[in-house]
Amino acid sequence: MKHKFWLTGASAMPDGKIVHSTTDTYGNILVVDYPNYRALSFDSIHEQSGFYVEKPYALVHEYIRIMMLVLGFIEPRHTTLLGLGGGSLLRSLHHYLSHCDFHVVELRYKVYEIARDYFDIPDDERVWVSIEDAELQMSSSEDASTDIIFADMYDAYHMSPIQGQQQFVRECWRTLSKKGWLVINYHRLPGSNSPFFECLIDHFSTIMVCSGKFGNHILFACKSPSVDYERAPVKLKKMERILNETFMPLFKRLEHVTA
């Protein structure tokens, strides 16, 4: 539920066209083409993901740019992505991080097929895709086996409940390396006095939130209290140059969360 568009017959807006549609047990999946732009939708109204055909690694949506702020604090060797969608985050991470391996966990096989066939996701020895429920995958993951966990799990209308569960926090903490980061995309943050937040504060030493202009709230949680805030702008400005994107104004919106 990132952006809205309306479909009439075979078109999305006056200049959009459905180029592929399919259905699985979870619902519909649509691919909609605009001039120079392609979008993924699960319900004909909300855009789940999108990319520019001529520049597939560009960061179309603000919330993806916010999620990538974590790269100002860590240089990962291994990253886990829970939820693939159209692969926007994976494409940009893969383009920028030349020495990082990626494990993608996607519940719906047809979403993976469409991302592969229509959204130009990277397919090389650095990318491993598991078609599996993220909750099951996390419960069987190895201790300290990844440096960043990105969680962005949504169907057409709702966030996956796992992103608000205490057990998810515990499994992520166990799976992350000693200076690892958990990054979660929310449309509504869990309450600061909720059992989820209490569990998060019990397990993670550093917690921050950055709110976007379009209703997304990105939560950042690090296992280590030693976070280098002074060097982060240097790394983010380098990322701005390489990706031709803007990160520093978003970085300045980060806010710390305390008990």
Image: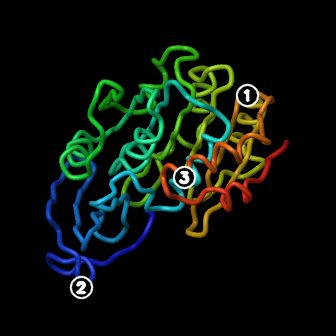
Type of amino acid under label 3: Arg
Q: Are marks 2 and 3 in contact (CB under 8 Å)?
A: no
Q: Is residue 86 left or right of residue 96?
A: left
- Residue 72 percent across, percent down from the top left: 65, 42
Looking at this view, name the residue that lies furthest to the top.
Answer: 143
**Marks 2 and 1, how far apart in space?**
49 Å
**Marks 2 and 3, how far apart in space?**
35 Å
Secondary structure under the numbered disc 1 in the rendered image: helix
Which residue is tagged 3? 241
- Residue 139 percent across, percent down from the top left: 49, 22
Query: Closer to the observer: label 2 or label 3?
Result: 3
Which one is earlier in the sequence, the residue at label 3 or at label 1?
A: 1
Which one is earlier in the sequence, the residue at label 2 or at label 1?
A: 2
Disc 3 crowd rating (10 Å Cα; few below 14, some 14-19, many 20+) is few
Secondary structure under the numbered disc 3 in the rendered image: helix
Query: Closer to the observer: label 3 or label 1?
Result: 3
- Residue 46 percent across, percent down from the top left: 37, 67
Q: How many marks?
A: 3
Asked if residue 246 can be seen in this view, the reply is yes
Quarter holding the N terminus?
bottom left
Type of amino acid under label 2: Pro
User: Which residue sits at x=72%, y=59%?
Assistant: 253
Front residue of this view, candidates 75 and 209: 75
Which residue is tagged 1? 203
User: Which residue sits at x=47%, y=31%?
Assistant: 80
User: Which residue sits at x=62%, y=20%?
Assistant: 177
Q: Are marks 3 and 1 in contact (CB under 8 Å)?
A: no
Front residue of this view, candidates 136 and 173: 173
Above or below, 178 against 252 in this view is: above
Which residue is tagged 2? 14
